[in-house]
Every structure is written in C-alpha cells, then in structure tokens.
Image (cartoon, helix red, strand yellow):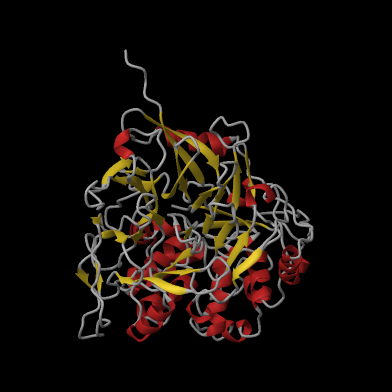
Amino acid sequence: MRLAAITILGGLMLAGGAHSDELGDRDAGRKLASQCSTCHGRDGYAQIPIAPHIGGEPAEYIRNQLTAFRDGTREHEMMSIVARMLSDEQIADLAAWYSGHKVQVELKQDPSDAPEQCVACHGADGLHVYKDAPNLAGEANIYIDTQLKAFRNGKREHEIMTPIAQTLSDEEIRAIADWYADIGLTIEMVE
Amino acid sequence: MHRKLLSSLLLGTMLVGPAMAQDNMDKLTNMQKTDATFTFVDQSGDRAESLKKIAEQLNLPDGFEASLYAVVPDARSMAMAPQGTVLFAGTRKDKVWSIVDRDRDRVADQVKDFAPSITFDIPNGPCFSPDGFLYIAERNRVLVFPAAEFFFEGPDPAVGVVVAQGELVPEAEESFNHTARVCDIGPDGKLYISLGQPYNVQPIEKIEMYDEIGIGGIVRMNTDGSDREVYTRGVRNSVGQDFNPATGELWWTDNQVDGMGDDIPPGELNRQTAAGQHFGFPWTNSGVEIVSEADFPRPEGVEFVEPQLQLTAHAADLGMRFYHDDSFPEEYHGGIFWAQHGSWNRTTPVGARVMFTALDPETGDAMGAQVFADGWLNEETGEYRGRPMDIEFLPDGSMLVSDDFAGAIWRIAYNPKPAE
C-alpha cells in the first residue's frame, strides 16, 4: 500500500464558467436539466455511482457525448433513451448549463505519481487539459474502469482513447481509475 | 452550492497498487497477512445529524418508529451474519461495509470496510450460508469468506474463489449498469445469483446467447462454483430475491423496460415454483409486448409465467425479504417486504418507499401491494431525501432499510405506545 501524502494543492482550480454561453442558452439548459438531475444532480455532481460528474465539464465534451448517445454512436441503456429526443439546440443548452458550474479539486497524492498516459489530456488532478476530454476528478473508480474497458473492447470508440486503452491490462486500468477517483471534487452551482 | 465530498467523511483512503491486488488475493487464500488498513466511517457529527432529520420525515403505520441505524456510504444489498453479530452491506463501487452494534442499543457504533486487502469490483451482493460462509457476488466474480463474522475484525480474512474473475459473464458482456448482483443460499444449499442483462432490451442477436448463459436470469451452482445451471429465464434485471421460508420457493423482483412511457410496463414481483421457468423477457414485460414473435420467435416448449403482482411502473422494485420474525404485528408474518428505489426518468417521480404484500394462506400467492413506509421522496420538489434499496432484519425482528442515495441504513421497529 502506498501511503497517501496529503498534499492540498494551493489555490482553486476553476473550470468552465464565462466562455460557455456562446454554445447554448443556460436558462433553457437549467430547465431541461430537471430530466438529468436524478442521476447527475442539478449542479452536475453525480447522485449514483454509474453516472459521471458533469458539472464544469467542457461544453464541447458534453455536447459531443449527448450527440453520440442520440445518434447511437455511443450506447448506454439509460442515456440512449433520454438523449434520443434531444435537438441540437437542446443539447447545446444542456452543455451550457452543466459546463457553467465551477469545479474545485483537491489532489491528495504526489502529482508525479499520476498515470503518465493520461495527464496530457486529463491532468494529474483530473481536470481537462484538452477540450474534448472529460474531467475525471472524483469519478467513481468503477465508472472510469468501465469506460477504459469499453474503449479497450471497442464498445466505445475514440481516436485517442481507443489505442491507449488497448495497451492497458485490467490492473493498470484499475490503478488509473483509483488515481482519479481519489481526487476530491467540489462543484459550486452557478445559476 | 457546496457539496461535501463523500470520501472526506472517511478517515484516509488507501491505494492498492496493481501488482499488490493479485498478491493480496494469493496471500489471503494462503492465510497470510497483508499490510492493508481499514477505512472507518464516522457515526457521529453533521452527517449523522442531518440523516436523523430524514428519519423524522418518514411515514409509517401506527406503532412503528424509524431511526438512523448507521451511516454507510453507498449502502446496497445487506446480509446479517447468522449469529446476528455483524451486518454486511455491499456497494456499487469498491467497498463492502461491516456494520456492528456492539452495545446492542440498536444503533451501529462501528462501520468499517470489510477485507480492505481485496480489490473489489461492484461488490453489490453479500449473502450468508446458515453455517456462516459469506458469499460476495461482484460484477464478474464470486468470492467466499469462511467465518466472516469473526474474521471481519481483521483486515485479512480468509477468502476463497467460487467463480473466478471473468467467468460469471463473458467479459465482452460486462457493463456498469445492471451488474448489481444479488445472491442467496437456497434450501438446497446451492448459491443463487441474479444476472441482469446489460441493455434496456437486449439486441435480438444476443437473445439466445444470454438465455444459455443466464444473463437476464438467475443462475444457481454449488457453493464451490460447480454444476452451474440457469435456474430462472426471461428476466430483465432482478436486484432482489428471497426464498419463502415456509415453502422453499424463490421469489424475486424485476425492473422493467424504460422509454415506453410513464405508466408502462408495470413493475414485477415474481414467484418461481420450479427450476427453469421462463418469465417472458424480452418478449413480454408484465404482459406488455416488447419483442414481437415476428422479430424473434419465442423459445419452444415454455409457457411464460405471469408476475404475481404488477407494480407502479418505473418505481424500481429492488431488494426483498420474507418476514419470519415475530416482533411485527401478526398481519406481517410470512409476508414480503421490498424496497422501491424510485424512478429516474418518469415525468413525476414515484417510489422511494418500502412496500409489503401478504400471501394468501390457501394458494400462497401475493395478495396485493401496499405502501408500508414512505417519505424519502419530497413530493413537493420531486427530489429524493433517500432511496431505499434493500431490506434486512435484526435479530430482534426490527427492519433495516439500506439507502444508497442518503448513504444510510434506517431501522424501522414496532414500538406501540401503551394504551391510555
């Protein structure tokens, strides 16, 4: 067992906010989000383990995933149902609502131990560096584990993630999932 | 809005390195020690106080009282040790919790993770054999812990593998949703495990393969994993089962198809009277046609068994238990309690309550669902205060209700006030 060196990184790491308005109408998104909140919360903090935290996620990532669920290029037994009726505009509105919340993370481990295959896009602290990459901070480890295995076996496809996941063993996947799950996440709802 | 991170409630977090995980399994199966340490869950403080306020808002029949039994993050299916010393609760994450009430004041005083040396993967379903073997059904593995009610005190309990990693279902059929397994030891001494099928409705090309493996079914096997067979066919995703102690018959709940509208298909409570019975899915769901004969022919030589009860659509009927203690009033004896988790995409949310049905003394059939306890759903805002997931009983006959939304286990006891 590795002992957790409790290193609280100074300062607030903020994501989302100001620049997301151009994509959709936040007010319309807030109303639509009542359909999402049982699982994802109104602020995007997941209410059930199988759902990811989506508050403060890059708007582009949310839009791409909702579009993929609607069009059938990504499948999930719940998301495929709720996304199938959404218009492009509604997807943009939801992306604007959820991306606009403020995210704060607390990294408890030494960042130099972060999984090196992941940090270029997802950061050592699980905050996206690249706009089509999701935040991973504080996600349930089983969620990340399940997604990496889906990329590895082809159930989910992405030009960057697929080849990376194909090199990973079950144990490496779990270690990556545990790294990001262990990061503290706080979401501040922005009305 | 600021939200407290769940793990900040826990004292410390541990990271088992990738190589360490298998090493630990090897060590434990050889009864050796590891350097794993426990995670304890604080049972006092702000979190416990706010949960107690939820207990005050629950509605119960006259004479019953609700209280907070334990703070247990993500608490799912429960199993009480045969000697009543410790309760185990699974999660849909990576922990199994041991919950102890040492001073017997009906409030847990210690909650810590069970077998911290083991890397669990969706260990939703714990179940005990009468002689004290604890089985834990994970997403794709089944483990057994002999004498768990004694060994849980240390971080390195003895462990055996009943079904090896990747052999419960083919790895290609693994998912996160619909992989919350539940298990039970039947009157025949065999281990019964539910296997939800991963889709809303499985693709037609997978129907036969799933039927053969028992995905969308309940499988049974010897407790060493041998002689596996499909015991129940035609299930969508069952997350609650129990054997009727009076007859030995298996009863189970099922979760129905989403996306057909707010009021169909109804939820199901099922009674199984023989091995191999088929309950209709994916062709029918509570009598509603899902896959037509034209799309895919029904299996030959089977008649679909209709549900005992048709329940409120989308309310998510999950964990269930027969009542075979005696501290509740007579009308509950021999009946079934079950948890409704609550809907996730119905226009007006329903569920988040504890239901009950008595059984007809002549036929043994369920007589009709009634609400036993509710108040976990705020009807004004449509928001959940909690979501009941499973039912278990303390040795004194009082009820425990696990709640993976609030992160709690509630206790419901019958304490009638003396007559004036």
Q: Position of residue B304 (x, y in %)?
A: 24, 71
Of B365 and B376, nearer the camera is B365
Q: Is residue B381 left or right of residue B392?
A: left
Q: Is residue B22 above or below residue B210?
A: above
Q: Residue at x 40, y 79 (%)?
A: B210
Q: Residue A85: name its quadrant.
A: bottom left
Q: Which quarter shows the N terminus of chain A?
A: bottom right
Q: Is residue A51 visible?
A: no
Q: Position of residue B275 (x, y in %)?
A: 36, 69
Q: Is residue B325 left or right of residue B301?
A: right
Q: Is residue B285 left or right of residue B39?
A: left
Q: Residue at x 76, y 61 (%)?
A: B31
Q: Position of residue B265 (x, y in %)?
A: 24, 64
Q: Is residue B15 visible?
A: yes
Q: Residue at x 59, y 44 (%)?
A: B86
Q: Residue B105: name its quadrant.
A: top right
Of A51 and B336, nearer the camera is B336
Of B129 and B321, nearer the camera is B129
